[in-house]
Amino acid sequence: SDMFTIISKVNKLINKNCGLLIGFLTQKKQYSYITSNSTYSNASIYCDCDDIIVTTNNTITTDWLYIEITEKLLTNPLDFYMLLVSKLHSKPIDVNIHTKDQNINSSNQLTIPCGWCSWYHFYESISDNILINNLTSFLLIHQKYYILNTYFNLFQIDDGYQLYWGDWLQLNPSKFPHEHSIKEIIDQINEENLIPGIWLAPFSCDIQSNIYKSKSDWVIKKSKPLIIYTNLYNLIYTTTYYLFYYLFLNNKPANSANCGKFFYGFDITKQEVQDHIKSILSVIINKWGVKYLKLDFLYSVVLRDGNRSYSNRYITRAEIMQLAMKLINEVVKDNHKQNDIFILGCGAPIGSIIGHVHANRVSADAGLQWKPPFPLPSNDKWNLPSARSMLRNTIVRSAMHNKWWINDPDCILLRQSTLFTIQEIIALATIKAISGGSFILSDDIDSLSINRLRILQKCLPPNKNTFIPIDLLYKEIPENLQLTLSNESKKWIVSCLCNWDDYN
C-alpha cells in the first residue's frame, strides 16, 4: 500500500480476528509505502525523499505514522483511522452543488454530485451539436421520469473540447466552430438551472500543444539518476542501463503513459507555471461560468523519473503536490461566488489531496466491459479500465466516503451497446447507488431505452451514506455489504448480498 495497510489473522472457528493496521496520518512530506514479506512476519515502511538537496544544519522529518494493534477487529476496521486522518486535514472551501431555485444553507455535508458526463459515449468526439442535443434530452428525462433537477443537476463536459491538452482555452475548431460556443453552452446550462461542469488536466500538456511548443522548458524532464551498486552483477546492470539512459533519455521530457496516451507534466515549482495555471482556471470559472471542476491526471505534476529536474530541488514530490493543490484552492477561493465551485480530483496520489478536493475518484475507470479488454491483461483487478476493477476499488475504499471526501466511483453506463450483460449493469448500478458517492450517467441519452432509464430512476435520489463491507478481510471483492439508513422515526439496515465468484 502507498499510505496504509491492514493485516489480519482470521480464525473463523472462534470468530476472532486479530489485526495490525499501519498507516501514515498525512502524506504531505514524502510519498511512502508499506510492504511485508510473504508470511507477514516482517513489515517495512519507506519514505521517498526524492534526492532533494538538504542544506547544512537542516533535518528531514517524516509524516506521522499510526500503528494500531487489536485482538479483535471491528466490523469496520478502517473507520477510526479514516476519522483520525480526516481530523488532521483542513476541509476544502464549503460548497453545495445546488441550483438557484434551491434554498440550501451551507452545511458540513456536501451535496452528492449527480448528473451526466459526455466521456464514456463520445470520448474525445464531442461537438457543440452533441452537447446541445444531450442537454435537451437531459431536460426531457426530468419531466418524463419525475427526476428532480434539485439533485440530478450536473451537466459535465469532458475531454475533446480543447485543441490539445494544455491548450484549454483554445477550442477545437472542427467540433466547436464558433469562438465562444463552449461559453454559450455553459450559459445555457446555467439558464436551465443546472450545474455546468468541465474536465481538464491542469498540470499536463500534449507534445502537439501550443503551450509545449512555446514553453517546452516548463515541463518536467527526465533527470540523471544516482548510480548505486553492491556487487558485480549490479555494477554491470546499472552501468549498461545508465549508459543507455544518458545517451537516449536524460533531459528529455518525462512522459506519463495512460493506456497508450503519452503526455507531459508541468514543473509547478516555477512561478510562471503557477501564474499560467491560475489564469487558465480564472477564465474557466469567471468568464465561462463553470461551477464543477473535474481535475484529472493530477499525478503528472509529480512524475517519478523527473524528481531531479524541478526548479526547486529542496522539496519532495509530496510537498510539490501540496503546492499544486494549494494553488488550485487559492484560485477557487479568490474566484468563487456564493460557495458554488466544486472540485473533483482524479488521478492523484490519494494521501496528498485530502483536504484539497470535495470529491475524489477512488476507482479505476469504469470501462465498457467487465474485465480489461484485449490487449490489456485481463487478470488485472485494481488499476486498468474495467467494471471489475472499478467495483472492487469502490467497495474496499468505501470507508473514505464522507470522511476524506465524497467518493467518486466513476460513471454508470446503461446503454445496450456496451459489452455488459443486464445482470452486470444492475449489479454496478446497485453498488454505485448504495455507495453514497457521485452518481453520473455517461451515455448518449437518446440511445437509452425506457427499461434502462427505469434503472436510473430507481437509483435516485442519491444516498449520502455508504455501506460497510462486512467481509472486507475475507473476500478479494467483498460480497456482504450493509447500509444503515434512518429517518426521523426509525433506523433500519439494508443488506446487499453479492456473488462475484463467476466474474473473478
Image (cartoon, rainbow, N blue to C red):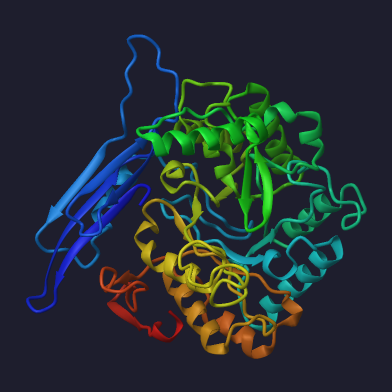
Q: Nearer the viewer, residue 245 or 54?
A: 245
Q: Is residue 337 above or below residue 222?
A: below
* Farthest-out residue, left: 14
Question: Residue 149: image x %, image y %?
Answer: 63, 68
Tally of numbered tags:
0
The residue sitting at 76% across, 41% down in the picture is 207
The residue sitting at 85% across, 61% down in the picture is 128
Using the rendered view, name the quadrant where residue 121 is placed: bottom right
Question: Residue 369: image x %, image y %?
Answer: 59, 77
The residue sitting at 17% across, 50% down in the picture is 68
Image quadrant where one finds the C terminus = bottom left
Q: In the rendered view, does 335 fall on the left or right side of 305?
A: right
Q: Is residue 430 above or below residue 409?
A: below
The residue sitting at 21% across, 68% down in the picture is 75
Q: Is residue 491 above or below residue 423?
A: above
Question: Residue 194: image x %, image y %?
Answer: 68, 61
Residue 337 seen in render = yes
Question: Residue 376: image x %, image y %?
Answer: 59, 67
Q: In the rendered view, does 312 fall on the left or right side of 488?
A: right
Q: In the rendered view, does 432 fall on the left or right side of 199?
A: left
Residue 330 seen in render = no
Q: Nearer the viewer, residue 175 or 349?
A: 349
Q: Is residue 476 above or below residue 194?
A: below
Q: In the rendered view, does 304 fall on the left or right side of 351?
A: right
Using the rendered view, name the quadrant where residue 89 is placed: top left
